[in-house]
Image (cartoon, rainbow, N blue to C red):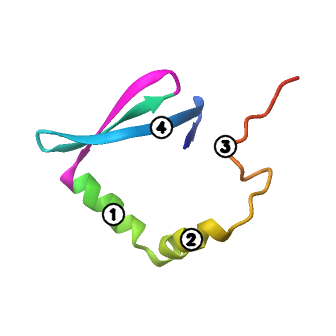
Amino acid sequence: MIIKSMAGEFEISIEGFEFDGRHLVMVGRMGVWDARTYISGAELLTVIGRLFKPAVVFGLIALPFRRATPESDLTTEKSND
């Protein structure tokens, strides 16, 4: 996965999930840094609620059938050669 922001593009990988008190913790790496993302129950419900909007559900269903284009292929690194 890639996070795009004004600070740049960072590759993020999810290594697993665990619980810390009342938070779900997503454990992974962002670029060269170890990362732990803490998600409260309310935040998790908000994310799940947004995932179930019709446009998102249909987009997720269609995703495996979409053809990659050079602009949309975020996993390919471009060379500066």
Q: Is residue 62 above or below residue 9?
A: below
Q: Is residue 69 above or below residue 13?
A: below
- The numbered mark, 3 or 4, whose residue comes first in the sequence reads 4
Closer-to-camera residue (22/17): 17
The span shown in magenta is 31-41
Q: CA distance from mark 1 to mark 3?
A: 25 Å
Sequence-first tag of 1 and 3: 1
Residue 72 in view (yes/no) = yes
Q: Secondary structure at mark 4?
A: strand
10 Å crowding of disc 4: few (<14), some (14-19), many (20+): some
Would you call the spot at circle 3 few (<14 residues within 10 Å), some (14-19), or many (20 or more)? few
Q: Are marks 4 and 1 in contact (CB under 8 Å)?
A: no
Residue found 50% across the figure and 70% down from its top = 56
Type of secondary structure dominating the magenta stretch: strand
Which is more N-terminal, label 1 or label 4? 4
Of circles 4 and 1, which is in front? 4
Q: Which residue is mark 2?
A: 59
Mark closer to the observer (1, 3)? 3
Label 1 vs 2, first from the N-terminus: 1
Residue for badge 1:
48
Residue where numbered disc 3 is placed: 75
Q: Is residue 47 magenta?
A: no
Task: Find out whether the residues at labels 1 and 2 contact each other: C-beta distance under 8 Å.
Answer: no
Q: Residue at x 52, y 75 (%)?
A: 55
**Left or right position of 74 against 24:** right
Among the 4 quarters of the image, the one containing residue 45: bottom left
- Where residue 77 appears, as percent x and y from the top left, is 73, 35
| Gap between marks 3 and 4 measured at Cα | 12 Å
Indicate the quadrant where residue 17 lies: top left
Q: Is residue 72 above or below residue 65?
A: above
Tag 1 secondary structure? helix
Q: Mark 4 = which residue?
A: 13
